[in-house]
Image (cartoon, coloured by chain):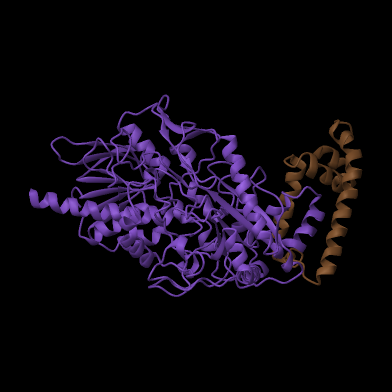
Amino acid sequence: MVRFVHRNPWALPFLDAVTAMLAPRCLLRGKVLLMLAVLEATPDHVRTFSPATGSRLRSLARLAGWAAAGLSKFLVGLALYPVATSGRP
Amino acid sequence: MSNPDVIVVGSGASATSAALPLVRAGRSVLMLDVGNRDTRYAPLIAPAPFSSLRQTDEGQHRYFLGDAFEGVPLGQARAGTTLTPPRQFIHRDTHRHTPLCSEGFFAFESLALGGLGSGWGAVAVQFDDHDLADFPIKHRDLAAHYASVSARIGLSGARDDLLPYYGDCASLQPALDLDSNARLIYQRYERKRERLNGAGFFLGRARLAALSRDLGDRKGHAYHDMDFYADNGRSVFRPWYTVEELGAYANFRYVSPYLVNRFRELPANSGVEVEAVDLTLGRREYFRSRCLVLAAGTLGTARIVLRSLGGYGTRVPLVANANSWWPCLHLAMLGKPADDRRHSLTQLAIVFDPGHCGRIPVHAQTYSYRSLLLFKLVKEVPLAVPEAFGILRELVNAFVVVNFFHEDRPSPDKYCALRRGESGQPDVLEIRCTIDREVQRRQVRTEKALLRQFRRLGCWPVKRISPGYGSSIHYGGTVPMTVEERELTVTPECRLRGTRAVYLVDGSVLPYMPAKALTLTLMANAERVATLLNGELARTCVAA
């Protein structure tokens, strides 16, 4: 799957979404998480990683947005997953 | 120092609590320890608040993630997952020198200076007579030692609803300040106290071995939220402070790196000989003393005892607090900013006593989440990383993590046995634990019953994380304290049966594991045993 993503970088968000659900300990997910950890431990990105604050309503709206985006990526990823794991380019 | 009066094995909370009264009474004490330390990360961490380090320190990745990314756990949650890179020296070399083969048990040992106490969560509560019901000693036997250990290590807490369960302490400092998250929960509890107490739910401030005021050279807590990484100001008690204190006495000697293998009693009451390996030279050395105090940890002490008494293959019991984590959402905090000034330790403690009988089956502690960073949570969310991260950014200030500890009793399905190492390899401690399914179901039911009350405080459980039996790192019971004469047990004075001068003072002597944190009791018991031993040494001197 990692090779597939190297050849088709556009597929990463979708395969990340599907592996989060189906194969959370896979190599691809591990690499993405490691990258996230490195970014989080860098002063330049500290604001990006700070907790979000604001009104409760806005917070709920943002949560719904993230969940919807995650679900759509998962559905696309589900279609891609058999191709990415089949070993074909 | 010629042959000392006492050899103490280990340098953890129990070992130091036993050594100190002996040394103060003028006994010569030799402490044998492996004594690993962190020399890599500690010097990198400035005594500054978490938020300021995050914004300014270019080298923060070293102590947050580790030079070999050892702070980025990608596998399943397991024992010691809260151990950050600066704390991982605590279990360094254990796989090499003290190998384990375990099934159904997540074992964690330490060869560090200060032992497991170098990374403990600092919860320090007393066992009452309900907790000690299966012990051959009572609270009155420990009371003076609880008081003296508490005054020495410095306890903070409040005389609140948990006082009947935690016991009082004259030297108690005011509780550490709550963060905004815990403060809101506590305020709501105060409004609903009567109803919650009626259901057996009691909430209070955490009782911690962490200073809220200066004590000697140690400083009151600075609220930097760096407790998982550094000991700046020495606010949180660590046993290695006591090793330093002991070092000032001429009748005390600390030697490392020595791994103790076995002991043998010398004929004609002439003392004990201890065989240890100098880990620098790989050479066996022998030390003699009048008495031996073993405090190498529940599993380490079991190894030494079994090897010394030829107990290879003999099964000894093992008990451990089953534990679980429940992240909960405190909806009142959604979208609200959290205090920057805070500590990372337990904020609130919960005692659940639905039968109002005093003997509590479960004890819980709450934490807020920040300094362990978001990436550790992202892997638990079944969404793509950007979305998981976005959701967690929204929720992190509202997270309350509840950590449950259940009582545990010995059973034939939970044991360990020592297997002789092959061709020069170290002996292997085999651990087999099968947890009764009905017990597990009962534990989950109890947790859910407690969480139903917690919901009344506006906290909604999200999911249960069970890192596995043993992951609490609260072990005991391998050589239990009993009244009846049995092999591989200790007397109520903690003398190993079948020996004249070998005493055990760590978790190995606990015949039962109450739900409450055990460290303060281990320290008090170690001091009790050392006091008795000192009297015994004085008597034998007079007789001689």
Q: Nearer the viewer, residue B185 or B138?
A: B138
Looking at the image, the residue that sits furthest to the top is B423
**Residue A7 against residue B342 in the figure, above or below:** above
- The residue shown at (51%, 66%) is B161
**Residue A88 against residue B19 in the figure, above or below:** above
Q: Is residue B96 left or right of residue A80?
A: left
Any part of residue B518 in sight: yes
Q: Nearer the viewer, residue B67 or B271?
A: B271
Any part of residue B13 in sight: no
Q: Is residue B473 left or right of residue B463?
A: left
Q: Nearer the viewer, residue B194 or B256?
A: B194
Q: Is residue B366 left or right of residue A54?
A: left
**Percent of width and height locating residue B441:** 62, 40
**Percent of width and height locating residue B500:** 21, 40
The picture's colour for chain A is brown
Q: Quadrant of residue A56?
A: bottom right
Q: Which chain is purple?
A: B
- Give the number of marks: 0
Q: Nearer the viewer, residue B375 or B356?
A: B356
Q: Quadrant of residue B63?
A: bottom right
- The residue shown at (37%, 55%) is B523
- The residue shown at (31%, 62%) is B144
**Percent of width and height locating residue B381:** 75, 50
**Percent of width and height locating residue A1:** 82, 37
